[in-house]
Amino acid sequence: MIAVHQLTKHFPEGPNAVDHVSFDIPAGSSVAVLGPSGCGKTTMLRLIAGLEKPDDGIVLVDGRRASDPSWVLPPHLRDIGMVFQTPALWPHLTVEQNILFGVHGLRRREARRRTGELLEMIELEGMGNRYPSQLSGGQSRRVALARALAPRPRHLLLDEPLTSLDRGLKWRMLSVIGSELKREAACLLYVTHDAEEAERVSMRVLQMESGRIPEQGPVS
Amino acid sequence: MNAADRDIPMRSRHLGWSSALHCAGLVLFLVIVYGPVGALVVESCRAVTRSNFDWLLLALPSGRRAVLLIRSVGLASGVALSSTAIGLLVACTLWQWRAGARAYVRWGLLLLAPLPPYIHALAWTSTWTAFTTLLHFQSLSSMTGWLGAWWILTMTWLPVSTGFALVGLESVDVALIEAGRVARADSHVFLKVAVPLALPYIIVGGVFGFVLTLTDYSVPSLCSVNVTALDVFAEYSASNEPARAFLRALPILTITALAAVLCQAPLQRAAQSPPWRRREPSPSLAMPRWLTQLRRAALALMVMQIAVPLLSLLVATGSWKSLTLSIAAARSDIADSAWQAIVTVALCVPIGLAVAQELDGHGHRARLWLFLATAPLAIPAPLAGIGVITMWNRPAWIDLYGSSLAPAMATSARFAPFAALIMLAQWRRLDHLLIDAARVHQTSALRTWLQVRLPMLAPGLAAAACVVFALSIGELGATLLVTPAGASTLTMRIYNYLHYGASGTVAGLCLVMTAVAIGAVGLALAILGGWNIIGLSTDRGGRS
């Protein structure tokens, strides 16, 4: 599970990006964060991932203190899978190498099987040897999703992962995320602009405005 | 502005008269940089034909010369490897210095980059002698031989390799690092993501170190070791035959040209991911203990690289009075050097701008210009000087050749490519939409140039001018050959003094040279930093 309590972060020029935010995501459940551009959604995700240090408040991951103003647990020790706003695929690695980057301790055959399985799920079979420069924008986004799912993380942080995908593909990818979530009993924090997407993927929606979460409630 | 608009090469935006100026700049580049080499090639072909092809044997390294070439390549490879490895470790530390004063200090450590190698030689040999005398190791009292040359040259090119590695690491998209950090430990991400992505720059830095070492003869001659570059110089001094010198130089020219060719792919990759477009500060990565210790050791060497020349020169100079006496004695040489450097700047900056515009395109033409702009860096300094003599020492040009312009032609031939590469950095930084807007609303082309383009290009022009000035004032290899009889430059005076050992006078003059180099590069860095071209700014905007 993930829990944040009074989480706050400000940048030198401007108001608080995240302002005393509190919520929790129990294992096996999903939460969507909705809000306009610049309201602090991405910063909150980065704080939970351990990519930023909070100015105030704490982040708990599986009940352990993961971040507070004095200490940050390294991101790779949080058992997190993350999709960033941009695909952020490493250009010098193939699709397969990108997907397997975070996977530890698998034999070559198992790793191949896992990659094949993921490529099939994201509908990119046979593209494992391609480089990111040979992919379209939508394909890159799906590879980024597969990379986040590959190590079977217990926590998924997805920052507008399906932007620019066509509607049909988007719904199919959402069902992939849903089934992985169920299989791993993972918790999901899903950032999006799209209310319909938020309703499809999550059990609960947090509405974020100017770094705060004035409203949260179950999906209608 | 969409990506397609941004990628339109500048040549498609030219106006009538500025196209003419642009073409004139390109022609001037070819004449100044490639003219001397072309003249040497023609002269050599003639000489070979006259000798019934006997002279061709000069180009084949055999016997003693083969051994010399192997040793020279060995020295250059050793220097390139050591300076690249230390430079990468230093850059790894500097990359993470992103807050407050450290963000400025990290670029400040590169201030001695254009300091001529022979000044490092003087500083290190005198420091070594003092050190061994202090410890009563009289048998090790002189820093000579291959080991001495390797150490001095490694220290000389350390800022260059560090600079390239730092620029390479700065070019890595922070998002790619963070994507890795979520999955693996920081050290793994550094080695598997950051270093491979920065590799084009690191390779280019290593190749620079290799080529600059292979073509330098000043440090080997001061360390009493013979290298091929010195052999070329000696051949010309003894025979006064440009063709013989050129043919003798062909083996190292082939090797350096090969290095330049191998450099093309990394350079192109580097040009496609320019760090000067980057806004995000570098992430703070936790490294394993052994790597941290290595980084500290490398940083200590970098600090020594700056401290040893400065302190030893200050100590050797002795007093303010002896410094002023040295300067007074070399007043005319200093004036000649400054004049030569100013003329070089006046020639290099405009033609560098024209070449930079060609480099900013895509396709075969840009690739060809990238080769044309980088290949001259592989030409040994003495050969550039001999080429200038061969080209301009003709009755029709005798007034030009006999004037103080000749050294400036030689230094321009060597440093115009540097101006082009710096201008390219600035050009890539521009928002081309602003130029398009000016074109749409312009009332006169000249006004657009003066009010929009020139101010936008100003930082690059100023930085290129500073760097070319610093390099020109310290140039020796070509200047030594082409300076008219009776004239002398500061570098020539220093080099001549150096052969008689270190003294207060020579230390004082070296100190002047060091101050000029630091001042010029510092000014260039301040200009580039002011426009946030090299990422001095450390502010971080909010995220959505």
Image (tube, coloured by chain):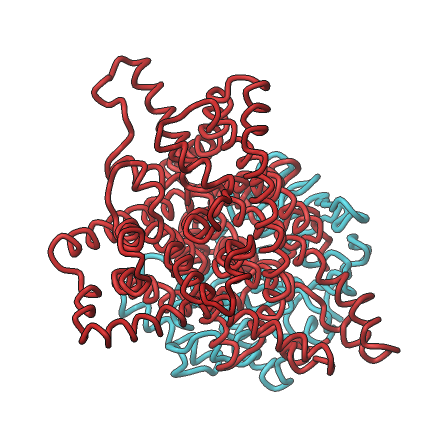
Chain colours: A cyan, B red
Q: Which residue is farthest left?
A: B63
Q: Position of residue B247 (x, y in %)?
A: 26, 65
The answer to whether residue A25 is seen in the rendering is no
- Closer to the camera in the image, B175 or B355: B355
Residue at image x 82%, y 74%?
Answer: B438
Q: Residue at x 28, y 26 (%)?
A: B142
- Say if B396 sits above or below B536 in the image: below
x, y percentage for residue B219?
Answer: 34, 41
Residue B111 visible in image:
yes
Decide if residue B441 is on the left or right side of residue A136: right
In the picture as drawn, the residue positioned furthest to the front comes out as B395
For the C terminus of chain A, which image quadrant?
bottom right
Q: Left of B178 or right of it: where is B305?
A: left
Question: Which quarter of the picture shows residue B20?
Answer: bottom right
* Residue drawn at (42%, 43%) of the image: B158
Count of numbered labels shown in the rendering: 0
- Whole-percent x, y for residue B258 in the image: 32, 67
| Nearer-the-camera pick, A88 or B498 | B498
Would residue B164 be found to the left or right of residue B77 on screen? Answer: right
Q: Residue B522, percent across and down? A: 62, 42
Quarter of the image where one finds residue B28: bottom right
Which of the pair A66/B392 is nearer the observer?
Answer: B392
Q: Which one is nearer the viewer's eye here, A188 or B530?
A: B530
